[in-house]
Image (cartoon, rainbow, N blue to C red):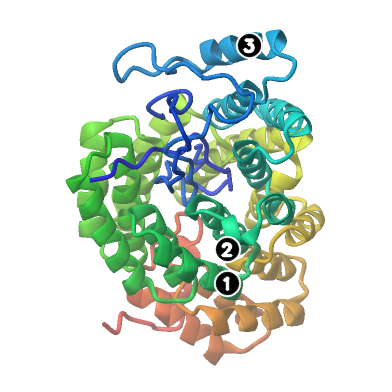
Amino acid sequence: MKKYVLCLFATGICAIVCADSQSQDSIAPSSSTGHAKTSIASAKGPYELTFEDFDWQTGDSKPLPNSATGLGERMPTEKAIDLFRKRVERGASDYASRTVLGELYLRQATEEDCLPAYSLAMGVLQDALRIKPDYKPAILWSAKVMMAQHQFADALKLIGEGIPADSQSPADLAIIVDCHLDMGNVDQAKVVLEQLAKLEKSPPIDARLARLAELTGNREKAIQIVRSSLDTVKAGSADETEWHWYQWRLAGLVFDSGDLDESELLVQKILDDSANDERASILLARIAFAKNQVSRAQGLLEQVVKLHPSPPVLAMLGDLFQHQGEKVKATECWGKAEELIREEAAIAKAAHAREAAIFFADHDRHVNEAMDLILLDRNQRKDFNTADAFAWILFKNQQWNEAAAEIKALMQKQSNDLLSLYHATKIHQALGNIDAAKGHLQKVVDVNPRFSIQHAADIARLQSEWKLSRSR
């Protein structure tokens, strides 16, 4: 059974999954002789990839040492960066070491939330490509840095210009799929993904197939795919971090389908192995809240904030305090979240535009600025989440007809996303289309009316006012 290598980075859509950031068995691929086959690897964060190996010994590049400090032991990122920075300083034409250094800077950016490291990564990767313009690893890592900064169109262009279509490998095609999905180009992504699935059958490809199914409204198919992938990963030689990602992904899909008990069982297994797993803790907090275990949810979120006070989790904790009537604590959390968002935006505004826009709109802060930010995000991608956020921010800016047109188009693509259904409810209510609003909210009530800590109280109020009860 093939071992699927973990991704070195994850993008930060600053959704609560952060980032996702986003362990790897080693700081770089091992040395190899001859031409190494590239393969898709499973992602630590959603839908990213890396290579099983690179062709490090072609041309005039120097062989790289095995980067592990011991058997299976990973060298710390800072130590690895120092090692390869010295190699780069010694070798004016060492494009291979520059590529590894770029890879390491990207890891530092995502693991440590070190945003300036993105620029360092791109700088050394561009140096590598100036030395050897056709060096494929440098092309692909450059594309990944662009993706991490939400420069999806630039990443697609780089792949297209740097790697001929007739020589594109599964790893290349996976980046293309991911870019198209993030840009909202579902039809293009489907075509490339079908081509990719013919070349290789693996859990990372299945993860993309599941994402496509989810984006097109077929959540049950997505659950089936990820469940099968999880079985494959567990049966193989994947390490703990890898199967945790698939377990977390399945738990999230099951939660969205309304099965709180199975979702809790799945996520609890992750925390039994890794008590401080951030994504699992956040999801368990949402499950606890959905089960009306508010104190438990608060304890989980406070634990996450203590370890990693990211804006999305601070915002969620503030929403929980607001739900409990603790307005002072809520305001403190939201203020800290905004402070951190603005710090991040000063360095990487485009990559954090949607996160900031949604936070501002959700909490009725700076709604005009939220519109500027979501328009900036729409210039980079027009995926489902951006479209939903755009409709919501139009609503918050009282552009209700425009919001209705956007949400109608969204519902035609996918009509079972709980957050967008709630947004549709509020938009139609504002326009006086109460029957349409009731219809959207009924779908939320049937699945999970407490899916959102922030919106649960309003959903409960409307459910009572409109006398809606669960119909299934």
Q: Which mark is residue 171?
A: none
Tag 3's secondary structure? helix
Taking 356 as reference, is 54 above or below it?
Answer: above
Q: What residue is pinned by disc 2?
A: 181
For the residue pair 156 and 170, the one nearer the viewer reads as: 170
Disc on the earlier residue, 2 or 3: 3
Seen in the image, is 245 located left or right of residue 102? left
Q: Is residue 297 visible?
A: no
Taking 237 as reference, is 382 above or below it?
Answer: below
Q: What residue is pinned by disc 1?
A: 186
Which percent across, then down, holds residue 15? 54, 49
10 Å crowding of disc 2: few (<14), some (14-19), many (20+): many
Tell me which amino acid carries mark 1: Val
Tag 1's secondary structure? helix
Q: What residue is pinned by disc 3?
A: 87
Disc on the earlier residue, 1 or 2: 2
Name the front one of labels 3 and 1.
3
Q: Quadrant of residue 110?
A: top right
Question: In the rendered view of the protein, which quadrant contains the C terminus?
Answer: bottom left
Q: Residue at x 46, y 44 (%)?
A: 38
10 Å crowding of disc 3: few (<14), some (14-19), many (20+): some
3D distance between C-alphas at marks 1 and 2: 6 Å
Disc on the earlier residue, 3 or 1: 3
Q: Is residue 268 visible?
A: yes
Q: For the residues labelled 1 and 2, say whether their Cβ atoms are less than 8 Å apart.
A: yes
Q: Quadrant of residue 149?
A: top right
Tell me which amino acid carries mark 3: Arg
Q: Residue at x 73, y 20 (%)?
A: 93
